[in-house]
Amino acid sequence: MDLSKDETGSGYRFEIVASKDGQHFVRFVAANGETMVRTETYKSKSSAKNAIASLKKNGPGAEVSDQA
């Protein structure tokens, strides 16, 4: 969903957020509304969308490193 367009949603989701300086970043939000991950800031919204696509493609097969 794109918060810069006032879209809303629920459940696990990616959110594209506009920063104060006009750039964008992506948050991965849990069903309870808690932010789990936040990306770096991107100059364009299309770069933020590309980050989401990459996370969806590469995330499921990524190695897990438990630092706890």
Image: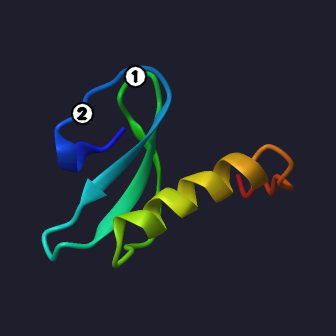
Pick whichever, 65 or 33, lies toward us. 33
How is colour applied across the structure in the image? rainbow
Q: Position of residue 48 (x, y in %)?
A: 44, 63
34 versus 28 height, above or below: above
Pick whichever, 32 or 49, lies toward us. 49
29 versus 23 height, above or below: above
Q: Hey, what amino acid is under mark 2?
A: Glu
Mark 2 residue crowding within 10 angstroms, few (<14) / some (14–19) / many (20+): few
For this orientation, the residue located farthest to the left is 20
Number of disc labels:
2
For this orientation, the residue located farthest to the front is 46
Report whether 2 appears left or right of 62. Answer: left
Pick whichever, 39 or 45, lies toward us. 45
**Residue 7 got which mark?**
2
**SS class of the residue under badge 2?**
loop
Report whether 13 appears left or right of 25. Answer: right
Q: Residue at x 20, y 50 (%)?
A: 4
Q: Residue at x 86, y 48 (%)?
A: 61
Q: Hey, what amino acid is under mark 1?
A: Asn
Instruction: Of the two numbered discs 1 and 2 on the same chain, state the one appearing first in sequence.
Output: 2
Q: Position of residue 5 (x, y in %)?
A: 19, 44
**Residue 59 got which mark?**
none
65 versus 43 height, above or below: above
Q: Which residue is mark 1?
A: 32
Q: Which image quarter: residue 65?
A: bottom right
In this view, the mark in front (1 or 2): 2
Q: Position of residue 39 (x, y in %)?
A: 47, 64
Mark 1 residue crowding within 10 angstroms, few (<14) / some (14–19) / many (20+): few
Q: Which image quarter: residue 63?
A: bottom right
Q: Quadrant of the N terminus?
A: top left
**SS class of the residue under badge 1?**
loop
Report whether 34 appears left or right of 17. Answer: right
